[in-house]
Image (tube, grey):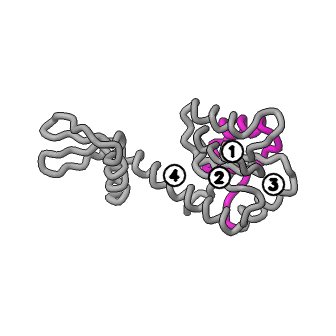
Amino acid sequence: MEEKKSILIVEDERAIVEILKFNLMREGYDTLEALDGELGLELARTKDPDLILLDVMLPKMNGFEICQNLRDAGSTVPIIMLTAREEETDKVGLEAGGDDYMTKPFSMRELMARVRANIRRRSLDLDARASVGTLLKAGELVIEPSTFSVTKNGEPVDLTQEEPEIVRQGAAELN
């Protein structure tokens, strides 16, 4: 039986937290909740959630700071930013390391679809990384899925910017 995925909700409006919690639990997720940025960052670091729903405007520490802090620490957890502000600079919060964003008010159905998509994407990434030590060989080519590197006759092959993603997808499909 697959372990339940956990989602950290970092949102200062309790009513929104309760609605999100209800819908996420109905979809089969466990939830953790934080009503301010400092607690949200602490839970993200100590509880290792599978996804974070992160409000931008929070007391004690804003969502951009939390996101940047997690990314600087090497966290790859998917983060969906939730914002009531619609300025272009807020949408560019993805530059702080967010994976997706939604503007409030949002469709719960759309949010649940984005949650599932981001968790599925992370599972594929983790599966590809779990194949450490499994080399893929095709003639003179050797692919190391854990690092997405390729060698030919023992010499490293320079990959274009898009090619590591192609290697990652191919390795995920083979597992």
Residue at figure coordinates x 69%, y 44% from the top left: 90
Distance between mark 1 and mark 2 Cα atoms: 9 Å
> Quick check: 146 above or below 114?
above
Can the viewer see residue 8?
no
Left or right side of 89 for 85 = right
Residue at the image position 45 percent from the left and 50 percent from the top: 125
Q: What kind of element bears circle 3?
A: helix
Q: Are marks 1 and 2 in contact (CB under 8 Å)?
A: yes
Disc 2 to disc 4, C-alpha distance: 16 Å
Q: Which residue is mark 4?
A: 122
Give the Cα separation between the discs numbered 3 and 1.
Answer: 21 Å
Q: Which labelled disc corresponds to residue 17?
A: 3
- The amino acid type of the residue labelled 4 equals Arg
Which badge, 4 or 1, comes first in the chain's sequence?
1
Q: Nearer the viewer, mark 2 or mark 3?
A: 2
Amino acid type shown at disc 3: Val
Q: Which residues fall within the magenta stretch?
A: 27-53
Number of other residues with Cα within 10 Å of mark 2, as a class: few under 14, some 14 to 19, many 20 or more: many
Nearer the observer, disc 3 or disc 1? 1
Q: Is residue 147 something that shows in the picture? A: yes
Q: Which residue has dot 1 on it?
A: 90
* Precedes in sequence: disc 3 or disc 1: 3
Question: 94 left or right of 105?
Answer: left
Nearest to N terminus: mark 4 or mark 3: 3
Could you tell me which secondary element the residue under label 1 belongs to? helix
Q: CA distance from mark 4 to mark 1?
A: 24 Å
Element assignment for label 2? strand
Where's residue 44, x and y in %?
67, 40
Quarter assignment of residue 24: bottom right
Pick whichever, 136 or 115, lies toward us. 115
Q: Would you place residue 47 above or below residue 171 in this image? A: above
Q: Label 1 is placed on what type of residue?
A: Asp
